[in-house]
Image: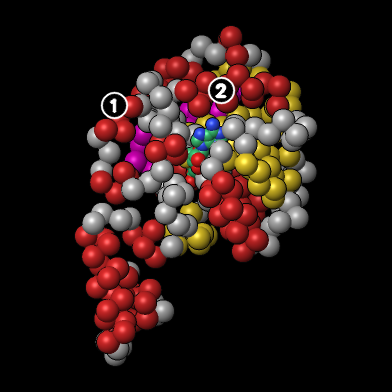
Amino acid sequence: MILSHLLDVERYMLYINSPPITDDVEKKFFRLISQRCKHVPIAYILKTTYFWGYQFMIEPGVFIPRPETETIIVAATELIANPEAEINILDMCTGCGVLAVVLAKMFPESLIFATDISQKAVNLARKNVEFYNLQDRVFVYRANIINKKINKKFYLIVSNPPYLTREEICNVPEEVKKEPLRALNGGRDGMQVIRRILEIAPELLEKEGFLILEISPWQVKFFHNLEKYGLVLVRVFKDITGNERVVVLKPV
Ligand SMILES: C[S@@+](CC[C@H](N)C(=O)[O-])C[C@H]1O[C@@H](n2cnc3c(N)ncnc32)[C@H](O)[C@@H]1O
């Protein structure tokens, strides 16, 4: 991957063509290999990642999107039958903006608002939005959960918030330790940011709208009784490895 990146050729070309390698490329190659040996994730080294088949810019300091988060896209497409729906969508904790961009592509008549507490994430999400020329429909703001100035109701709210417990964070692989702690840290029970989202979601959601949240499989139990939030669990989606990963909630 590193060599094909440096030579700007498809990976299979390395096997069938053995392209010449200059001294300069060789030096860069070993510099990047040594970063990888220090557990720097490949996405940070190549500054590129993929989500739902789309390419995204990524950089250190911003969470690297994971395949299991694509389950949120699966859930959204099952819940919204009409791709031409003129709906408002909110993506809280957007990171580099993958959910906002892919949902904008899937629902071309929608308006998308995306927020993140990290200025670095907001800057990068805006770059990804511009890369796909979606800046007329996708608006990214820095905010702690939500910016009060976004005075709107949403048919769909999605979020992949930080949801690991303190204990889980101590045991993550070295690569994950290179990612921003704020993107992972959900407090003592992993539910700190999720609870804040549950508190504000009912006033932001349209009556018929949905909140789609990514969670840890063991957290599903917290979603069976949401009466105090004025929400109800309607579906649980499994990710590609068969773990219950995404919950769909509705206002009562
Ligand atoms: C697990 S990452 C998910 C990023 C992106 N949605 C994705 O799936 O790739 C969580 C994101 O939440 C952001 N975040 C953490 N606490 C937040 C808060 N209180 N308000 C808004 N964003 C927050 C982090 O900066 C991080 O970008």
Looking at the rendered image, the quarter that the N terminus falls into is bottom left
Residue 206 visible (yes or no)? yes
Residue 246 lies in the magenta-colored region: yes
- Residue at the front extreme? 119
- Residue closest to the eye, 146 or 49: 146
x%, y% of residue 2?
32, 70
Secondary element type, mark 2: helix
Count of numbered marks: 2
Q: Dot 2, how many residues are within 10 Å of its Cα: few (below 14), some (14-19), or many (20+)? A: few
Secondary structure predominantly adopted by residues drawn in magenta: strand
Mark 2 or 1, nearer chain start: 1
Vertical position of residue 212 compared to residue 234: above or below:
below
Label 1 CB-ligand 1 distance < 8 A:
no
x%, y% of residue 221?
42, 17
x%, y% of residue 172?
27, 38
Disc ID at residue 167: 1
* Residue at 59% over, 32% down: 144
Kindly identify the amino acid type of the residue bearing the numbered disc 2. Answer: Arg
Q: Dot 1, how many residues are within 10 Å of its Cα: few (below 14), some (14-19), or many (20+)? A: few
* Residue at 51% over, 25% down: 194
Disc ID at residue 49: none
Q: Magenta residues, as a range? A: 236-250
x%, y% of residue 192?
47, 23
Whether label 2 touches label 1, CB < 8 Å: no
Quadrant of the image occupied by residue 31: bottom left
Kindly identify the amino acid type of the residue bearing the numbered disc 1. Answer: Glu
Vertical position of residue 30 compared to residue 216: above or below:
below
Label 2 CB-ligand 1 distance < 8 A:
yes
Disc ID at residue 196: 2
